[in-house]
Amino acid sequence: MQAYPDLLVGLDKPDDAAVWRLDAQRALVVTTDFFTPVVDDPYDYGSIAAANSISDIYAMAAYRSWR
């Protein structure tokens, strides 16, 4: 028996993000980045971090649910 039955994609194979089932029709795609942007400006830092996270989510073929 799997320890986390709602974990659809985890660490068993290299992937860009984890996918956790919320209910029968929705899942949450979660990503973390351990490589921090090397910039001094807070705005640039946030922009780079957001772009990295969003690219990981799109790599998992995820999309927003509030179309």
Image: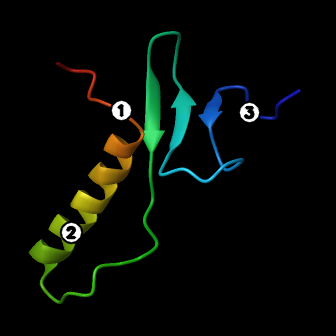
Drawn side of residue 3 relative to residue 16, left or right: right
Drawn side of residue 24 relative to residue 13, left or right: left
Residue on which disc 2 sits: 48
Amino acid identity at mark 1: Ala
Residue on which disc 1 sits: 62
Q: Is residue 53 above or below residue 20?
A: below
Q: CA distance from mark 1 to mark 3?
A: 21 Å
Q: Is residue 21 above or below residue 45?
A: above
Rendered location of residue 56, percent (x, y): 37, 51
Closer-to-camera residue (39/14): 14
- Other-residue count near label 3 (Cα within 10 Å), few / some / many at <14 / 14–19 / ≥20: few
Amino acid identity at mark 3: Tyr
| Residue at x 26% of width, y 28% of height | 64
Residue on which disc 3 sits: 4
Rendered location of residue 58, percent (x, y): 32, 42
Rendered location of residue 31, percent (x, y): 44, 52
Mark closest to the chain's N terminus, 1 or 3:
3
| Residue at x 12% of width, y 84% of height | 41
